[in-house]
Image (cartoon, helix red, strand yellow):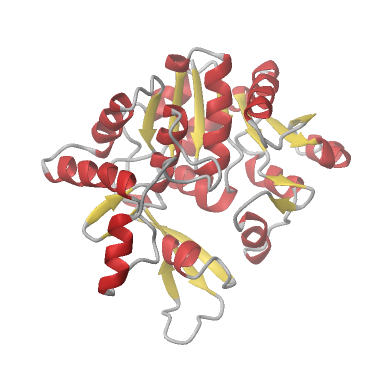
Amino acid sequence: MLTALAGGVGAAKLLVGLAAVVDPAEITAVINTGDDLVLHGLYICPDIDSVTYALAGVNNRATGWGVEGETWTVADQLRALGGVTWFQLGDRDLATHLYRTQRLAEGATLSEVTAELAAARGVRSRLLPMSDHPVRTRVTLAEPPPGEPPEVGFQDYFVRLGHQVAVAGLRFDGAERAAPAPGVLESIERAALVVCCPSNPVVSIGPILAVPGVADALVGRRDRVVAVSPIVAGAALRGPADRLLTELGHESSALGVARLYAPWAGTFVVDEADRDLAPAIEALGMRCVVTETVMSDPARQTALAKAVLDVG
């Protein structure tokens, strides 16, 4: 069995590659929910949906989020009415959020709803939210723009403000009261290999680690944990991971990420562009594997998945 820590587009790509190499039913993905939000009364789980859509083969590969062939009738009408449209919800995507919100209101847990949505779309892998309890990533702005509060929700920072405002701090509201979703700790403890996908280390992997018990479980399996760097040649391939690392006092490099992961990951995979960092990474007590990590097409997703599995 293979367990992956997942958040965002990079994770979705690697999971698709892994599902092409091993039986998808042998894969469990523990997915970040710190990005979740309630908008228009709907419970939205961006990272869970990105992973689900990708493994179902219906994701929009051009944007990295949403559904291929999406239409925008509702969003266009809402915009014409003067409603809130900074967070784009396509017509097909809306069906997912409507179903999730209905089931949660009926008393189902987020784990149960996630499993139902995955099964309905033909996903054979096991998809687990990191917790059934709400954990929300809150972002402290270094210099809030006029009219903005000093602290905003992650999607306000990432989408509404276009992640262009410097960040002074992060916190994961509710994490201290949360518990891992059913199956999360067991999937880590029993996995033949645990893969930390190339996701944003502070806002995608960070919330997962903040759930009590998860970091300790990873430390206990450190020799079987393989992490893939989301930073290549000092930069994030997409999103603000590089800027966030710098703004929060870390080095924006594969080495900087390795320092964050060293307590619980025994192997670290970096891109060929960062080969020179391998000795410094290994000095942290990690095995460093150098390969091509940029997943620009399905063939490269599969090649990286094979390289990760070969490590194990």
Q: Residue at x 54, y 40 (%)?
A: 61
> Between residues 234 and 180, which one lies in front from this camera angle?
234
The percent coordinates of residue 99 (x first, y second) are 21, 41
Q: Hey, which residue is sitting farthest bottom in the picture?
A: 146
Q: Quadrant of the C terminus?
A: top right
- Left or right: where 169 falls relative to 97: right
Q: Residue at x 46, y 48 (%)?
A: 207
* Between 221 and 144, the one nearer to me in the picture: 144
Q: Is residue 27 above or below residue 279?
A: above
Relative to 171, does residue 29 appear above or below in the rendering? above
Q: Position of residue 198 (x, y in %)?
A: 61, 39
Residue depicted at 56% across the width and 52% down the height: 202
- On the picture, is 135 further left or further right than 279? left
Q: Is residue 297 left or right of 15 when viewed as pictured?
A: right
What residue is drawn where x is 43% and y is 72%? 151
Residue 46 percent across, percent down from the top left: 40, 47
Counting labels gives 0
Relative depth, front residue between 141 and 21: 21
What residue occupies the far right of the structure in this picture? 276
Q: Residue furthest left?
A: 106
From this viewpoint, is residue 258 visible? yes
- Let me know if residue 83 appears in the view: no
Looking at the image, residue 5 lies above or below residue 200:
above
Q: Quadrant of residue 261?
A: top right
Eyeballing the image, is 119 above or below 240?
Answer: above
Residue 309, position in %: x, y? 64, 18
